[in-house]
Image: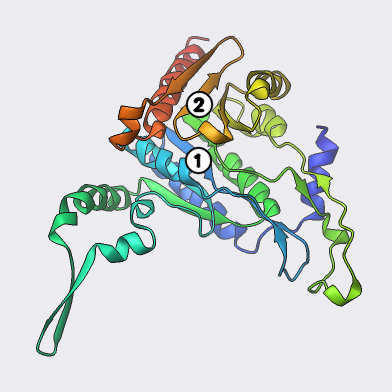
Amino acid sequence: MSTAEWEHFYASHAPPAELPEHRQQITDFCKHHQPNKIVLLTSGGTTVPLEHNTVRFVDNFSAGTRGAASAEYFLDNGYAVIFMYRQKSLEPFSRHFGGQKFLDMLEIQEKGSDVAINVKSNYINTIKPILSKYKSAHRENKILYVSFTTVSDYLWLLRVACECLTSSGANCLLYLAAAVSDFYVPSNEMPTHKMQSGEGAPVIQLQLVPKMLTPLVNNWVPRAYVVSFKLETDENLLISKSRHALNKYKHKLVIANVLQTRRHQVTFVTPETSFVINLNTEEMDSGIEIEESIVKNVISCHKEHIKQLDSH
């Protein structure tokens, strides 16, 4: 992907209105945590609007499960976390209590005109450690939440975040778990208002989203340890496509997974090696999450990366 192509994308898509605010937040967060290890973790899917005043859009199935879980394990291991996530996707800590599950944990106690809402006693031991970690992460300013919705919002925010992280050097880890759209509708080809069904079925011409790993690795954060993810439905393509990405973009690691088995098996692919991380049935039944092992191994790779750079 040439420089002209991704610069054209930025030039043809206005930055989100809140980008200056996000830039300041990320800048302050990075300064606060230097010279400690910091991870930029992207999570959730991106939308592709079909109108400027968006009613319809193309989306993907990602709920941000892997990203939200991974953020907690990075915090457990002492990293400061910039959690860059799709608005309304899963978030660290609160992911454990979504929807009806949270309401089932509560009970109403009425005494005269006084009403109290309490956590049921059998859920106290479940909630307490998660709430404690949540409070600690926020009290110590260890996690920063920044959200996106569209693919253009994501790419603008990614660029700004990388520019802010440049000063962190090798202590910076990029864990790019977001499911980024491969296609988009050029801004100048989108209608301003909602497409009308009375005008017949629209013909929509999608274009390829420029791959930002090239400028990211070479220009924006050249000393960072960069991890991307590869999801396939055909297991036979997994290793070859991961190695192709490594050879093309020159980053450090691809974590590859197959749609049907992604909850319990992933493959770490580096330029030289590959190995599988797998949960057995007993581990899955006991509630162990594969993200714990993923993060542990990524951190080990990051430590080795820092040692290699320090030795030169």
* Amino acid type of the residue tagged 2 in the rendering: Val
Residue 266 is marked as: 2
From the image, tell me which residue sits under label 1.
Answer: 41
Q: Earlier in the sequence, mark 2 or mark 1?
A: 1
Residue 4 is marked as: none
Q: Seen from this angle, which residue lies furthest left?
A: 111
The picture places residue 134, in percent across and down from the top left corner, at: 29, 51
Q: Name the residue at 51% across, 60% down.
A: 88
In the figure, is residue 250 to the left or right of 130?
A: right
Helix, strand or loop under label 1: strand
* Amino acid type of the residue tagged 1 in the rendering: Leu
The picture places residue 186, in percent across and down from the top left corner, at: 83, 54
Helix, strand or loop under label 2: strand
Relative to 192, residue 132 above or below: above
Q: Nearer the viewer, residue 139 or 49?
A: 49
Q: Seen from this angle, which residue lies furthest bottom?
A: 113
Residue 133 visible in the snapshot: yes
